[in-house]
Amino acid sequence: MKNYFLIIILLFGVINVYSQSVSNNLYLVIDQKNDTILRENPKSNTKIEYYQINKKKNWNLSLRHIYSPNYVKNNYRYQLPSVMVEQLMNNGNVTDIKTFLKKFDKLSYKKLSQYLSIHYSYYYEYLDGHLKKTYKRYNIFLIFKSDLKNKYVPCYEVSLILSRMVEM
Amino acid sequence: MKTLPKRVLLIITILFILTSCEKEKLNSQREEIGSKIEFNRKEITFLEFQEKINSKDKILKKILKNRDSKLIDSLDFVTGIDESSIVEIQRNGITTYTARVYTKTDSINDFTNLLVKNSGNETEIHFFRYFPSEDYQMAMLNSITQPFEGVIQSLDKDGYVKDEIVVIEGETQSRSAPAQCTFSFDLVWRCNFGANHPPGYPNCHGGSVVIGYNVRWTCTSGPGGGGSNNPDPNPNPGSGGSGDGGDDECYDCLPTEPIPGEEECTTSLCTLDTVLEPNALEAGTRLWMSSQYRQALLSDVLDFIIYENDNSNESKLFSIEGMEAERNGGEVDFEDKIINELKGKEKCLDNLLKESGNDFVKNMIANFVGDDSEFGINIKSKDNVYYTDEDGEISEVSGITKYSSDSNIIKIEISTLKANSRRALQVTRTLLHEYIHADIFRKVYSDSINSEIENFRKTYNDYKNTKFQPTASHQTMAELYLNSMKEALKNFHRQAMVGDYNFLSNNGQNNLDDFYEAIAWQGLRNQNVDAWINLSQDRKEEIDDAYQQYIFAATYNCPN
């Protein structure tokens, strides 16, 4: 029984390490000067929010970095050495957020939902007492353009919230 | 020594004569000016305006029927009139009326006046649009009186520019638009002491103020000359193109409120301009807010933005929508962040629902009320409501709910046409359905972290991520809200529509539960939601039967 339990723990560990591997992540660069970033209120659980609205295709996409004490599903926040960020840039893991979202302009709500799920989501698995639980996370992080000059670049994982803009 | 008094006497006499001449000259100048400027200006009420104007002109008739910026017709250039700014001007036997109007093409830095001239049995109407220069705006903000500077356009009834002049220091500089009528402009001044004096007149020590415009057209005939050869099919404004150039005069008034600028504010309206982003408030709404009758609303708005919400963007957006709603006859609760622009039957039912609704309804609406609520609601009636699906197909629907991340106001639109053609319980169902959509948006986008929202999002995301045909919102509504909706309708029917309930239930002898469930399913069953598909065929038939049995006997009316 103990061995079985250890195997499960090991399996979770492998999956999580793989899913959180830096090379699998997408890093979106936002410019604090030019991009609209919401939630500057420190009391808010959502520390950073960037959104995209597509009236024509009837969807609203919100990228939120959530962090709150006593909350178990907080987004990651870590720092990468600038050398590593340069490598990620060369590998195509880092892109301007507007450029990234621009390609969704012609996607319907359904197509966008599928695209984001297929390309960037994974199920984060954890143990809640003796119960195995999962929830969906995305391999998408925000980094600020102004931080790119620093020796260590802060990266903020985001939760994606997608809905239609108009419901009948 | 004897000659000295004689000389002194001579000098005194000469001085007396000279002084007398000067006085006589001044008196004659005053009389001349007085006879030229017989100018009476008084503010009149909208009712007085209605009584004084007897015109067959279609546009004027519409304006006179619709008070205080109510929408006249979506096709009309003029969309409303500011009833607080109507002025009657009498000069040289001519009476004109001027009032600020709202138009479809208003912008933040201009304003448009309607000018009505009664001459005999005929009534002429003209529109003038004023574009004050920045210097002039600054002067107004600092309460400095100076001659008008800027551009003035004469517009026709459809809003097209007929003529345009540039005015610098009160004098016409140029005329750019080709026209058969030349267009001139003079200022009419009044001394602050009350007499009619031009500026600089010696006795006008208190300074002069502009009290009106003298707007004059001189229309000539077209090429070839001759009164009968007037090329202008519609000679208004002007004298109609007499061959030798007939003259006509009208008198218009400048606004007395400051026009927005960046200087330190001394008025609430200026503060509002400073607080909001440039052009954030629609020009017509800003003009409407400038009325003295909107001072209380203006104070509420400024308190809400500055003191209660620390200049947050959300409070500004809500305020803009609130002011526009008030202008359209809606009700705004700044404290609870609720804008209500419902009308007629749907308004009556919505009020009843809020008064008599069960705990489900009250709790749901309470989530949008109060200082702690993240989201506000703007619910309004529209003649027709349309929904565009993902394939671009447009269909007319009974209601829609909208949310986008650039605002914390969830907007609900209810179709008046559909509401009027449907039974009262069906309209109540539409209101509930849209409030539930708003509640779903609230839970999806809330910043709060609690178990209720976590559980809800799990259901919502499961539908969003795995099943793409019906919307996640409708799937969730069918799974989590349907029973509550059915109970809410049942409670509402019994409490608020007693007559209809007694009639349909035969004074409580018939069980209407299946009928309420059938109504609750409207708007969901056709969306292919799993919860409906999973019902047995027998159950579906029971629900359909109950619907057919009672719906045609249910009342259309909202009980008042």
Image: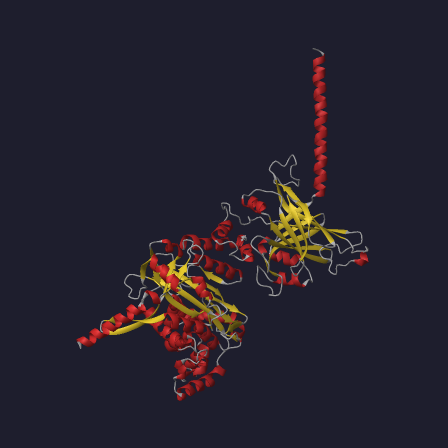
Residue B352 in sight in this render: yes
Q: Position of residue B221 (x, y in %)?
A: 78, 55
Q: Is residue B174 left or right of residue B295?
A: right
Q: Position of residue B268 (x, y in %)?
A: 49, 50
Number of residue marks: 0
The N terminus of chain B is located in which quarter? top right
User: Image quarter for residue B128?
Assistant: bottom right
The relative height of residue B411 versus residue B468 in the rendered view (above or below) is above
- Tell me what residue is drawn at x 79 percent, y 56 percent: B223
Q: Nearer the viewer, residue B560 or B305?
A: B305
The relative height of residue B5 versus residue A16 in the rendered view (above or below) is above
Q: Position of residue B357 (x, y in %)?
A: 40, 72
Q: Nearer the viewer, residue B467 or B180?
A: B467
Q: Position of residue A9 (x, y in %)?
A: 23, 72
Q: Is residue B300 left or right of residue B453?
A: right
Residue extending farthest bottom: B538
